[in-house]
Image (cartoon, helix red, strand yellow):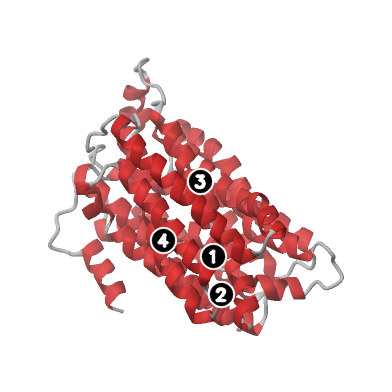
Amino acid sequence: MNVVASIIVNSFCPERAWPSYPYKLNLKNPLLVKITILLCSMMTVMAGATIAPSLPAMTAAFPDNPAAETLVKLVLTIPGLFIAMSSPVSGWIIDRFGRIKLLIVSLLLYAAAGTSGLYLNTLVEIIIGRVFLGLAVGGIMTVAVTLIGDYFDGAERQKFLGIQASIMSLSGTIFISAGGALADVGWRYPFGIYGMAILAVPLVLIYLKEPPKAEISLTANKPAEKIPKLTWTIYILSFLGMTVFYMVPVQIPFLIKQISNVGNAEAGYALATSMLIAALAAVNYPRIKRVLTHYQIYGISFLLMGLGYAMIYWANSYAAVYPGLIVSGAGAGLIMPNSNLCLVTMAPVALRGRILGLLSSFIFIGQFASPLLLQPLVNASSIRDGFLYLGLTMAFIAIISLIRNRRLVPVKAA
């Protein structure tokens, strides 16, 4: 509870002045604007985390399907592919037609597609429902980060991006725990949690404002504005981070059952712990950023993930898995705010939606590709050995990131 209270107080402390807006927006209630953006951001975490603990039970529910284990893992990760496909399109729509309408449509589609697992009867049908969920998340995630870039400036923007990432991780803790408990009742029940998206719709309609198009169009007429080359390095690092991180929700429930044969709820608690530590790391991101460069933070993130995965390799009991999840979660929690801040800072206003849309694409391509790229490694060795090999790979990438730091073009604080 102290963790939750700390995040809330730091986020919404009333004596803190609301930041100045680049577009001079007349917002009705700054506190509820923040809450609305954070509520929308939570939806992106729910896309995969909520049903992760139910994967073994879902697999067992289709004993006559020889490809059930692979298809069930696709149920978890297929949204990532379509988030990746829809995010650049969402970014183009945002820059061309605005933010709020796309956000409303995406939230409604999210609620309809997310809950489809409650009543669809085959894995193929469920996967199709998850495809539409991915399309919705691509719009929600891109709009949420773009609005933070619109509404916030300077140190307040940096702080709120850290808060956003921490709240997303913290909500992942709650939804994974709830999903694990519901999965013990029945594997379908966690899908009902996606209906929460409906709660965000009236808040968006009332409290979020569209930035005046005149301000954006003035910037759009500048011919010198191009996507900075450094963004592609950030995209690649974000892709690698998400690919490796998703080894946890995809494989940990199966590894825990191999080690201790515990229930779905216990698997949910283990995953929730990783999310909680990621939330703590993210909320402290602004402090870390004051003393480290973007590349140094990436290097530390990958190093912690590698160390945590090596610890998971050595775990021989349910309790022994937790230290590895804690260490790897601390590293994973820094990646998203680091990428978001770097790109929001360097992105021209007229290209902000497209640049952040591409970031969403790379992040969720990594999520989708994770089991496809890593399952052959697991099949050739074991889940346990897979964590060791990834840990060594992360250590190598960490070294490259730290060496690369001396060639980083400094990014000025927005």
Query: Mark 2 — residue?
Result: 179
Q: CA distance from mark 3 to mark 2?
A: 27 Å
Q: CA distance from mark 1 to mark 2?
A: 8 Å
Query: Mark 4 — residue?
Result: 168
Q: Earlier in the sequence, mark 2 or mark 4?
A: 4
Q: Residues within 10 Å of mark 1 (few under 14, many from 20)?
A: many
Q: Earlier in the sequence, mark 3 or mark 1?
A: 1
Query: Mark 1 — residue?
Result: 49
Judged from the image, the secondary structure of the residue bearing numbered disc 4 is helix
Q: Earlier in the sequence, mark 4 or mark 1?
A: 1
Q: Nearer the viewer, residue 277 or 220?
A: 277
Q: Is residue 211 visible?
A: no
Tell me, yes or no, whether the two marked residues, 3 and 1, touch with CB atoms within 8 Å. Answer: no
Tell me, yes or no, whether the two marked residues, 3 and 4, touch with CB atoms within 8 Å. Answer: no
What amino acid does circle 3 point to? Leu
| Quarter of the figure with the N terminus | bottom left
Judged from the image, the secondary structure of the residue bearing numbered disc 2 is helix
Q: CA distance from mark 2 to mark 4?
A: 16 Å
